[in-house]
Amino acid sequence: MAKTKITMFLDPDLIKWLDMNRDEETSRSALVRILIRKAMKLKSKRRNIVVDDFFNTPSLAPQFVPDDLKEYSDLLIEWWAIRYRNKGTCTKSVADRIFKTLRSFPSQDRKEALEKAITGGWKDIYPLKKGYKPEEPKNHPNQRVFKASEVVLPPTLAELNENNANKFMEDF
């Protein structure tokens, strides 16, 4: 790469600053080159990111959570970061679909569905699965209480005399 020679006129305070910030082996021109390169690296690292969709970020801003779902905003914000980290699509339309899905759940299931999505690291929110076994009702209509007085018990050997007991045993 060809170098181009330039001439700079500096104020005395700039020359004093250059002399204070360079070591004995570095010339003034070398320090100026170093400073320019640092500025160039810093500018290339700091690309201007244009955010056209505020949902396409790792953190969901609380003001974007609808009013009817505000009580779940902490869980939604936490889950949105997980969704973003797992490379899920994070756009306004996806957020609207998620909010619509949450509204379709019963209010008591919303919190649990979000918690399961967070702990499972899911990209989406799913309805809760109810157990395949129905819970037994507490007061079953056919419930019977066992009473010893209603049960017919066979006679004891003491109740039978010895002869009757032998006959009774032979019948079995």
Image (cartoon, rainbow, N blue to C red):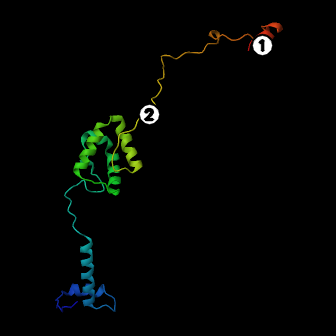
Residue 14 lies left or right of residue 142; in this view the side is left
Marker disc for residue 132: 2
Q: Hey, what amino acid is under mark 2?
A: Tyr
Residue 9 higher or lower than 111, as above or below: below
The image shows residue 79 at horizontal and vertical percentages of 34, 49
Q: Residue at x 25, y 49 (%)?
A: 94
From the image, state whether disc 2 or disc 1 is nearer to you.
1
Viewer-side residue, 73 vs 97: 97
> What residue is at 39 percent from the left and 51 percent from the top?
121
Position of residue 169 relative to residue 30, above or below, is above
Residue at 36% x, 37% y: name it: 109
> Could you tell me which residue is drawn at 71 percent across and 11 percent down?
154
Amino acid marked by disc 1? Glu
Observer-nearest residue: 99 or 37? Answer: 99
Q: Residues within 10 Å of mark 2 (few under 14, many from 20)?
A: few
Please determine whether, in this image, residue 15 is positioned above or below residue 152.
below
- Image coordinates of residue 171 in percent, x first then y, are 74, 12
Quadrant showing the C terminus: top right
Distance from Cα at disc 2 to Cα at disc 1: 51 Å
**Which of marks 1 and 2 precedes in the sequence?**
2
The N terminus appears in which quarter of the rendering?
A: bottom left
Residue bearing the label numbered 1 = 170
Q: Secondary structure at mark 1?
A: helix
Residue 52 in percent (x, y) is at: 19, 58
Q: Position of residue 63 (x, y in %)?
A: 24, 48
Which numbered marker is on residue 90? Answer: none
